[in-house]
Amino acid sequence: MAHRLATEYVNATMQMTDVQMNQFLQSTITSQINFRVKVMDSGGQEIMLEDESGEEVHLPFERKDGLYVCELSCRLVTPGLTNAVRKLFSAFRGSGKVNRIYRGFIMSYDYHEGTVKRIVQLSEDASSLVYEYKNTTGELQRLFNSNETEKEIELIHKSINDLLDERFSAASLPVIDRIDSQLRHYNQRLFVLEA
């Protein structure tokens, strides 16, 4: 199994309410990670997390629209701090790019509100898509709710009625042949749509 060398957070963001911030601080107290909180003049907070090896990360939370918002770009090496930030990022629905760096390749994860949307394996000479989120349920629901087929069938029925009226009053054989050709086309399309 490959050994992870580092984890990078690139333009990552997290948001917390006051209650969630208190939950985060309480969970940090019970963990193996040391932390310090610095209250800023603007009402924001900077939280510094440090593990037993001395590696640390600074999480600057600014107050925006009643939320604490953290914009984070950092590189973590030690497993304890990496795991703590990963749990924080997941629990508080982080968004952004997380690169897990291994010898010879990088696994790049795109997160949106705490959910992995895409995973790409990057190496020096190639990249390959490992996973991409597809909202299959949502797409099926959209198709189920769609009435485009019914609208097209209704338009074809109207066109057929108009063509039949035109055929009834047609005076020449070429006009009747053209109308019959269009009717055959509509008939085939209806067969496909109603299937």
Image (cartoon, rainbow, N blue to C red):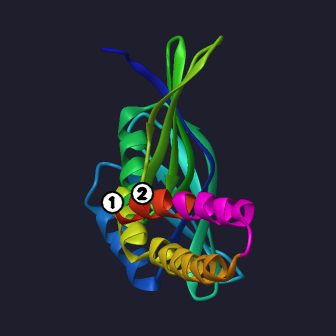
Task: Name the one closer to the observer, 22 or 153.
Answer: 153
Task: Look at the magenta stretch and give its main secondary structure.
Answer: helix
Up-down: is 23 above or below 126?
Answer: below
The residue depicted at 25 percent of the width and 60 percent of the height is: 30
Q: Residue furthest bottom?
A: 66
Q: Callout 1, which amino acid?
A: Ala
- Circle 1 packing at 10 Å, graded few (<14), some (14-19), many (20+), is few
Name the spot of residue 56 as percent of width and height, x first.
52, 44
Task: Name the one closer to the observer, 116 or 91.
Answer: 116
Up-down: is 56 above or below 106?
Answer: below
Is residue 173 rendered magenta in the image?
yes
State the SS at label 1: loop
State the SS at label 2: helix
Task: Name the one closer to the observer, 154 or 125.
Answer: 154
On the picture, is 116 further left or further right than 104? left
Name the spot of residue 49 as percent of width and height, x first.
47, 52
Residue tagged by mark 2?
192
Up-down: is 135 above or below 32?
Answer: below
Magenta residue span: 171-184
Asked if the residue at tag 1 contacts the one at tag 2, i.e. Cβ–Cβ closer than 8 Å, the answer is: yes
Residue tagged by mark 1?
195
Q: Where does the N terminus fall, quadrant-wise?
A: top left
On the picture, is 19 further left or further right than 75? left
- Circle 2 packing at 10 Å, graded few (<14), some (14-19), many (20+), is few
Q: Callout 2, which amino acid?
A: Val
Numbered mark located on residue 144 in the image: none
Is residue 188 rendered magenta in the image?
no
